[in-house]
Image (cartoon, rainbow, N blue to C red):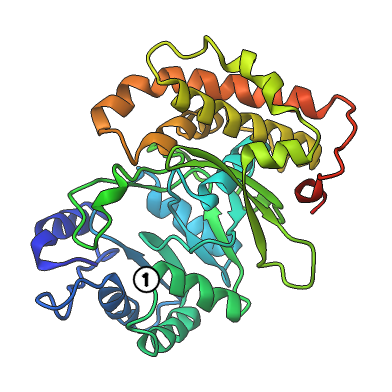
């Protein structure tokens, strides 16, 4: 799906795919107010006769070398599910992907945020239903939020790939997202091979992520509605679990050489919380973790958190250092979770 301004990019993407796999669908009102949803509804409506599923890819994506092989394998394994083939490096779904990488899973259950729509597969009946739903809400929410709401309301199982099957290639946003800076995948490995698509990680309750320079944490609330989440800083969550944040400062000090102290602290604290949660929540392994997938997933924690304020070149310069800090944070968090501690009286968020 594309806009006339980016037609060349869309045609190049379609031509690089296997014959007949991708067709270009154009914005039906290119002179109108920018709307991804308007074009998306046309793309979902363009499903061919006899097709069981529809794949929609935005024009600014780079596909992995095994994109179509893995997509087919995933459809065979999960024929009734919505499949997101990309997650942003600073998102909650991205945080879920990182836990998936740590657990050796190939797919993770999508979480309460939005459902990533830049590269997505829907079963035919789900695509048809979303078109009708979207047409009733044309002037409300963006397409990815509407997609999340539609899938949840209709009980459609929804998963995000580990690693991503596509990467975002910035051509300059025409839909109002330029302020966000570089928008990259949480984990993209072009040569990732198909296999083990049945290995999934679901039911995550705590999601640490680094966004807009803040180490944040989404915590699922207990209750009949699984879609209710509490949003905290990682520091608040850890303090609620009895982890004294002030004692962590010495571990962070001196780790940053080129990165700012704030970038180093945010990266380390997010990764520490990841390691802490993985061990505390007893997140078992769905399979043997792939070292390359895990390394890439951890390497994007820091870059995602500073992407709103740093250009691509500076992020690339800091990547290796921030990756080292993230690895150290995960290890320290796992060790901390294994030590006995007394919870504070105000430990509400950790009890959720």
Q: Give the position of the N terminus as an image quadrant.
A: bottom left
Task: Name the spot of residue 128 as percent of width and height, x first.
Answer: 43, 85
In the image, 119 versus 245, the foreground residue is: 245
In the image, 1 versus 228, the foreground residue is: 228
In the image, taking residue 22 as reference, residue 148 lies left or right, namely: right
Task: Name the spot of residue 241 as percent of width and height, x first.
Answer: 79, 38
In the image, taking residue 272 as reference, residue 318 lies left or right, namely: left
Q: Badge 1 local density, few (<14 within 10 Å), some, or many (20+)? A: some
Q: Is residue 3 visible?
A: yes
Q: Is residue 195 visible?
A: no
Identity of the residue drawn at 63% across and 44% down: 105
In the image, 48 versus 33, the foreground residue is: 33
Q: Answer with the quarter of the image where residue 238 lies.
A: top right
Task: Name the spot of residue 272 as percent of width and height, x first.
Answer: 64, 29
Q: Answer with the quarter of the image where residue 334 lies.
A: top right
**Is 96 rendered above or below residue 242?**
below
**Is 138 rendered above or below residue 237?**
below
**Is 5 rendered above or below residue 310?**
below
Disc 1 element = loop
In the image, taking residue 302 as reference, residue 37 lies left or right, namely: left
Query: Which residue is disc 1 drawn over?
Result: 142
């Amino acid at each position: 799906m594309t806009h006339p301004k980016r037609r060349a990019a869309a045609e190049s993407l379609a031509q690089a795919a296997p014959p007949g796999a991708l067709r270009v669908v154009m914005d039906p009102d290119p002179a109108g107010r920018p709307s991804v949803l308007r074009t998306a509804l046309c793309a979902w409506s363009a499903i061919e006769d006899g097709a069981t599923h529809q794949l929609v890819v935005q024009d600014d994506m780079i596909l992995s070398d095994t994109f179509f092989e893995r997509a087919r394998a995933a459809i065979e394994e999960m024929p009734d599910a919505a499949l997101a083939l990309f997650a942003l490096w600073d998102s909650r779904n991205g945080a879920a992907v990182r836990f998936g990488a740590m657990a050796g899973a190939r797919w993770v259950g999508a979480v309460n945020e939005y459902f990533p729509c830049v590269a997505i597969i829907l079963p035919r009946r789900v695509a048809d239903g979303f078109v009708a739903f979207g047409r009733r809400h044309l002037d409300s929410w963006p397409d990815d939020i509407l997609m999340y709401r539609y899938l949840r309301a209709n009980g459609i199982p929804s998963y995000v790939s580990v690693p991503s099957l596509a990467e975002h290639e910035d051509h300059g946003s025409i839909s109002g997202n330029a302020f966000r800076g570089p928008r990259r995948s949480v984990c993209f490995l072009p040569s990732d091979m198909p296999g083990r698509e049945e290995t999934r990680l679901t039911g995550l309750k705590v999601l640490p992520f680094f966004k807009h320079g803040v180490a944040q944490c989404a915590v699922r609330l207990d209750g009949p509605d699984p879609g209710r989440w509490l949003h905290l800083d990682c520091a608040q969550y850890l303090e609620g679990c009895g982890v004294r944040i002030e004692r962590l400062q010495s571990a962070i000090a001196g780790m940053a050489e080129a990165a700012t102290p704030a970038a180093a602290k945010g990266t380390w604290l997010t990764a520490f919380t990841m390691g802490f949660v993985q061990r505390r929540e007893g997140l078992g392994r769905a399979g043997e973790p792939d070292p390359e997938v895990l390394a890439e997933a951890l390497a994007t924690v820091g870059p995602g958190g500073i992407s709103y304020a740093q250009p691509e070149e500076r992020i690339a310069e800091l990547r290796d250092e921030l990756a080292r800090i993230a690895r150290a944070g995960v290890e320290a968090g796992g060790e901390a979770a294994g030590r006995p501690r007394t919870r504070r009286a105000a430990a509400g968020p950790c009890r959720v």
